Amino acid sequence: MNTDIDDIVKSLAPDPGPGLTPGAREMLTRIMDDAAPLQKPLKKRRWAVALPIAAAVAVTAWALPAFLTASPAAALDVKEEGDHYVIEVKDLYAKPEVYESRLRGLGLKVSLKVVPVSPSLVGEVSADTTGWEKGPFPYADKIKTIDRPEQCGRYRQCPIGVTIAKDFTAQADILLGREGRPGEEYQASAGLHDDGEPLHCRPFYNRPVSEVRGRLKEMGVSVSEYAVKRPGERGEDARATASVPDSMYVTGGGLGSSGTAVLVVSETPMDGELLRTILRKEGCGS
């Protein structure tokens, strides 16, 4: 089979289109559609299938209670190391204006939003800049995520932040992923199969809906919605529904929050060779 792997990924669930409900459309777009991303990640970790965080989504959907405020100094811990600033986020729930005030004080024209994301994207960073639509992020040598310990999340708290070169003079809008609170909708989500996500290297492709739903339930995750489409079918032809027959086949999906998932399902299973190619790409054997 000579199909390019990007085409394989797109065939799982392209842009879901107008047939989906708004919630499913936003979620599945962030998870599946890599045809025309609004932003590109700065780090090449686990973002091959998942969409980077969409700035438009973050701006319209990002809202926090008014009492979640902090002083600029308390919200961000800033250290100078050589020719760059090491900026660790201490208050993950401060308003963007609080972060921006501190960054502007450093002479940086950078805005920062910290948004809830699925597990594999915690600590990851995405950015946007005027005029940048395609190709590598032009400031990848200036803005990077901070180092995170190898055992991060197991034996120690995981630091979240960025390093920014002192001589960075351009404008950048940074979105940084944090762990979602119970019931909080993710602003970016990787696929269920990605490393760090609930079903990584666990058998769920081409499995009956009832089996996958049961497996997720054991993990404390309920299925909030289904996107029905045939393998390879255009996303705009997908149909969103709250329930499907237990016998349908699961061909993809992702978390919408820490306790909910959306499943992509089909009446027919994926081709066996396609499935083997996907599993090899994910490092999960066959």
Image (tube, rainbow, N blue to C red):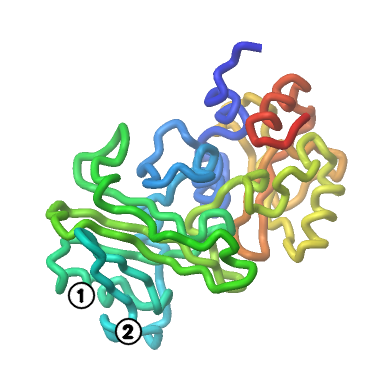
User: Please, what secondary structure does the residue beneath circle 2 have?
Assistant: helix
Instruction: Tell me if residue 21 can be seen.
Output: no
Q: In the image, is 108 to the left or to the right of 112?
A: left
Taking the spot 13% from the left edge, 56% from the top edge, the residue there is: 167
Taking the spot 87% from the left edge, 40% from the top edge, the residue there is: 247
Q: Work out whether 60 lies above or below 126.
A: below
Which residue is farthest front? 82
Identify the amino acid type marked 2: Ala
**Image x and y of residue 102, in percent:** 22, 75
- Disc 2: which residue: 74
- Disc 1: which residue: 101
Quarter of the image for residue 1 reads top right
Taking the spot 33% from the left edge, 79% from the top edge, the residue there is: 75
Q: Work out whether 166 lies above or below 191.
A: below
Identify the amino acid type marked 1: Ser
Q: What numbered label is drawn on residue 174?
A: none
**Image x and y of residue 259, in percent:** 67, 65
Q: Crowdedness of circle 1 by 10 Å Cα count: few (<14), some, many (20+)?
A: some
Measure how far apart labels 1 and 2 are at the Cα level. Answer: 12 Å
User: Please, what secondary structure does the residue beneath circle 1 have?
Assistant: helix
Q: Earlier in the sequence, mark 1 or mark 2?
A: 2
**Image x and y of residue 146, in percent:** 39, 60
